[in-house]
Amino acid sequence: MVRTAVRRREGAARIISPRVEPSTFDETQFFRAVHESGAQALLIGRRALVFLGLPVLTADYDFWLASDDIEAFNRTAAVFDLHPSHPPDQARQRGRYVLENDEHIDVLVARSLTTVDGQLVTFEAIWKRRQAVALDEASVSIPSLDDLILTKQVATRAKDLEDIRLLRILKEERR
């Protein structure tokens, strides 16, 4: 977050210089609060791969959320000064929305997705097969390895194909 220092002199404001301040977002506290909210929220995207120990970089968070839990998730996010781009009814119609301030969280609320090869992927099925990953004193729900691969097959961008390759290697190592 950039803040600008302002010096006032005889009623006139003069900008001195911008200061960059660190984010106050606490990832562990956020994940703990999401878990305690009871919202069915799955961490997906590259951040989930990071939690599995894979060598990828990402600057944001991606969640797939049960559409009935938007309000609970947003209340939790509000505590961390994260604001939704759309109200719950519009988010449900659109199938997605964003929470942001000095962090960026993409939130998927579609009940199902279709992979590029036509396979239907439903939130309910992935939620039933989820796994919990420990982060300090918090628990983060992420899809199973197979389901993470499926979520990456929805868009299949170049980075998704690389993520699929890494997930398959991890899956093979765990056998």
Image (cartoon, rainbow, N blue to C red):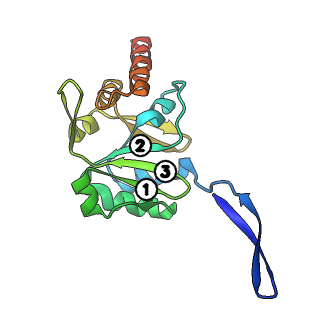
Q: Residue 49, position in %: x, y?
A: 46, 30
Q: Residue 120, position in %: x, y?
A: 17, 32
Q: Which residue is mark 3?
A: 104
Distance in Å between CA atoms under marks 2 and 3: 9 Å
| Residue plotted at (40% across, 63% down) | 75
Report the quarter where the N terminus lies. bottom right
Asked whether, in this view, residue 64 is left or right of residue 20, the answer is left
Quarter of the image where one finds residue 174: top left
Foreground pick, 27 / 151: 151
Q: Residue 138, position in %: x, y?
A: 50, 45
Quarter of the image where one finds residue 170: top left
| Residue plotted at (67% across, 54% down) | 22
Task: Specify the amino acid type for callout 1.
Answer: Leu
Report the quarter where the C terminus lies. top left
Q: Residues within 10 Å of mark 3 (few under 14, many from 20)?
A: some
| Residue plotted at (43% across, 56% down) | 99
The numbered mark at residue 58 is none
Which callout, 1 or 2, points at the residue further toward the start of the chain?
A: 2
Residue 112 vs 36, above or below: the answer is above
Q: Which residue is mark 2?
A: 62
Asked whether, in this view, residue 26 is left or right of residue 159, the answer is right
Q: Residues within 10 Å of mark 2 (few under 14, many from 20)?
A: some
Task: Specify the amino acid type for callout 2.
Answer: Asp
Q: Residue furthest bottom?
A: 10
